[in-house]
Image (spheres, rainbow, N blue to C red):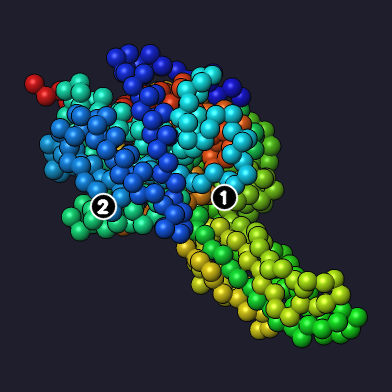
Amino acid sequence: MNIYDLYINEDDYPDLNADDAVRHLSEAIQINTTSYMDTSKIDYQAFDLFHEKIRQWYPHIMKHGEYMEIDHSVLIRIEGSDSSLKPALFMAHQDVVPIAEGTENDWIHAPFSGDIADGYIWGRGAFDIKEMLIAELESLDYLLSGGKRFRRTLYLAFGQDEEVIGSGAIAIAKYLKEQGVELEFVLDEGGRITDGEAYGAEIAIGSIGMYEKGYADLRLSAESYGGHSSNPFHGTSLQALAKAITEICDHPLESALPSSIRETLRILTPYIKKGPLKEALSDIDANEKQIIDYYLSQPELNSQVHTTIAPTMITKGSDAGNVMPQHMEAVINFRLAPQDSDAKLLEHCRKLIGPDIQADFVVANEASRESRFDTTGYHCLNNVLTHYFKDIVFVPSVNTTSTDARSYEGICDCCMRFEPFFEDQKIRALGVHGTNERISVRAYLQGIRVLIRMMDETCQSYVLI
């Protein structure tokens, strides 16, 4: 599938200043806004510089909007003329992940160069997610510069630390709640495009994330006497730990079909021409077990219906091959499905491993609430995406990674995760947190068109006479 073959209506908004849009993203990438769990490593002056550039680059937003900073996060408000309409919120995050140590020389263009070369904009943040942040600013400033005003109030929100703890988004959401704001919808990063093969569908599929799986790191601890390995009569802590890990991996929690997957299957039914799903979809409720079994058998679909289990860490054992370790620890990472609470998961694991193994959470966050997809925001996003991309059917889905969007669930029942920058899959796979992150100029500009139209339609713009 050549993703660029799916682009249509690229001639919309011919007066959009593409050169400025590209230059602004390039310069944004050059500002090193890397975040770290150890906040002492963060260069907050870089964030201050980024904010200064935003105020400089977007004069119409600064003229017609309210700009404020909450810590080092940014919130912009453009007041609408109809207070009966719930506001819309478009979001992204300012921070980027660090460059993996030892990979600096593997970059074709330096990671913070922002180079524009070979049809791409290069550097850390080009695809996660400064392109969306700058595109939202470009879109809003474009509409305001053309004399457009909105009936619906519009917010832009840019957190400072999504890649680590998300405190910026939490603070913004808290502020909005204190102001009595209830949002019509939130649009954040996420989503994906696939070729539909896993479903047996003869069409590309765009998955709009309507909720996020939870995240939990479970630590297992085992003790034993240690001693010489020639007499392992009582076993070793490593042996006990291995058995516990195996028990947990071999006994997953039950799978289920969330409402978003049911809606996805309903939408895809006309396009699925082959395979086990074709017959099963004649009655989703009656064939639920068959459908779940099919999802579990597919690498691309497996994680959508159950809590995944991935042992990821184990402490070093003894320093010699003939010495039994006394204390061993391991960490198992879980991505929680919405039907599983962290308390349920912990109880399940403790029953499997017995009393001799200690189990506790290092961190545990449950799945976000499933957002509604019978909403103005969802339907408009679907329509706008269909206007700019052909031969793709868009469906509600799960986001398997975490975003700042979940912080707004207390004031919004439609939190959507979908960035409209459709890039070649290889570039996307390498670009998110990887080496040689980049985005094509073509994908970037098409994403801006999507956001212009989305803001224009959902916020019911009009020309001020």
Q: Image height check: is 211 above or below 349? A: above
* Residue to which mark 1 is pinned: 304
Horizontal side, residue 441 vs residue 451: left or right: right
| Residue at horizontal 59 percent and vertical 47 percent from the top | 101
SS of the residue at dot 1? Answer: helix
* Place of residue 449 in the rendered image (x, y in percent of width and height, measured from the top left): 36, 24
| Residue at horizontal 78 percent and vertical 71 percent from the top | 319
Count of marks placed on residues: 2
| Residue at horizontal 40 percent and vertical 38 percent from the top | 31
* Place of residue 395 in the rendered image (x, y in percent of width and height, measured from the top left): 48, 38
* Place of residue 274 in the rendered image (x, y in percent of width and height, measured from the top left): 67, 33
Q: Who is closer to the viewer here, 416 or 290?
A: 416
Horizontal side, residue 63 vs residue 34: left or right: left
Q: Quadrant of the C terminus?
A: top left
Q: Image height check: is 251 above or below 380? A: below
Q: Who is closer to the viewer here, 118 or 383?
A: 118
**Number of other residues with Cα within 10 Å of mark 2, as a class: few under 14, some 14 to 19, many 20 or more:** some
Q: Image height check: is 127 above or below 343? A: above
Q: Image height check: is 21 above or below 169? A: above
Residue 99 position by quadrant = top right
Residue 393 seen in this snapshot: no
Horizontal side, residue 325 vs residue 163: left or right: right
Residue 385 position by quadrant = top left
Q: Quadrant of the N terminus?
A: top right
* Place of residue 44 in the rendered image (x, y in percent of width and height, measured from the top left): 35, 49
SS of the residue at dot 2? Answer: strand
- The disc placed on residue 70 is 2
What amino acid is labelled 1 in the image?
Answer: Gln
